[in-house]
Image: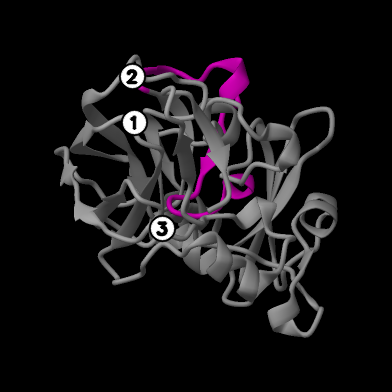
Amino acid sequence: IHGAGNANMGLPVQYIHGMASCSEWSGVPFSVLLNEAGVQKDGTWLVLEGGDAGKFSHTLPVAKAMEDCFVAYGQNGDVLRVEQGFPIRAIVPGWEGPFNVKYLKHIKVVDQPYNTWNESMNHSIPRPDLGGKSRWHHFQMAAKSVITRPSSGHKLPGPGFYDITGLAWSGKGKIKRVDVSVDGGRNWREAVLQEPVLSRALTRFRLPWQWDGSPAILQSRAIDESGYVQPTRAQLVAQRGLNSNYHYNAIQSWSVAANGEISNVHA
């Protein structure tokens, strides 16, 4: 998931948060493969190489691989589609998308992290909270949520009752609560979570809203079972600066105009 830049202002939610998905995967645990291969104690990292033209590669700690990662050959009861990494791909629950290497070709066991091209060029982001240094390795996805309806590109036909709904997720575990605000974060109401609420999976939330026709700013705020609270954009920028597109989990704001038109704004 990453945030929208200025070029995406006003586009529908799918263009801004469309790199999220939730599937039922079938595969073989990394722990089985590594144990069968007889990994030595000095083997602490894996280099996962994809078989695509760009040879997309990413490094993964062996400890995480042994915990809950697996090599997938099926998705939602069928074989992997070509777009999803056929014939096999890595699945690294709760961690950033690049770890889930598609078209998996080679798994190399090494004794240190490799700064692969993609990790070095696309994910080494300078941060002011680190004295201008880059944080090289980003692992777990922090809690995030977004209202999907109503959202940018929609237009409310007029004042009346609306069902605010959206999705929340966290790499740390289950979503514990989602709050929704219709006044830009001044006041919050707890939304209803739709079952099942599963660890590191998309969770649907809903909140009824009676719109009176006046301008409004819709926001959602996720809290996961660790107690982590989704930050505001101002909080995230104050910590990381403006270079966090690949790791952006700030609260999303949708502006509802008096004529019902909805747009993407920074509130």
* In the image, residue 100 above or below residue 59: above
Asked if residue 78 is among those painted magenta in the image, a careful observer would answer yes
Question: Which three-letter amino acid code belongs to the residue tagged 3?
Answer: Ala
Asked if 48 appears above or below 261 in the picture, the reply is below
Outermost residue, bottom direction? 131
Mark nearest the camera among 3 and 1 is 3
Residue shown at 83% from the left, 59% from the top: 120
Real-space Cα distance between discs 3 and 1? 20 Å
The spot of residue 267 in percent (x, y) is 53, 53
In the rendered image, residue 59, in percent from the top left (x then y), is placed at 68, 58
- Residue at 49% x, 68% y: name it: 63
Q: Are marks 2 and 3 in contact (CB under 8 Å)?
A: no
Left or right, 196 with respect to 217, comes to left
**Image point (68%, 33%), residue name:** 8
The region drawn magenta spans 76-99
Which of the two labelled residues, at mark 3 and mark 1, occupies the earlier sequence position? 1
Name the residue: 41% across, 58% down: 143
Label 1 to label 2: alpha-carbon separation:
7 Å
Q: Residues within 10 Å of mark 1 (few under 14, many from 20)?
A: few
The residue tagged 3 is 143
Q: Amino acid at mark 2?
A: Gly
Disc 2 from disc 3: Cα separation: 28 Å
Of residue 10 and residue 102, the one placed in the foreground of this image is 10
- From the image, tell me which residue sits under label 2: 77
Colour mapping? one colour
Disc 1 designates what residue?
24
Magenta region includes residue 48: no
Pointers 1 and 2 in contact (CB under 8 A)?
Answer: yes
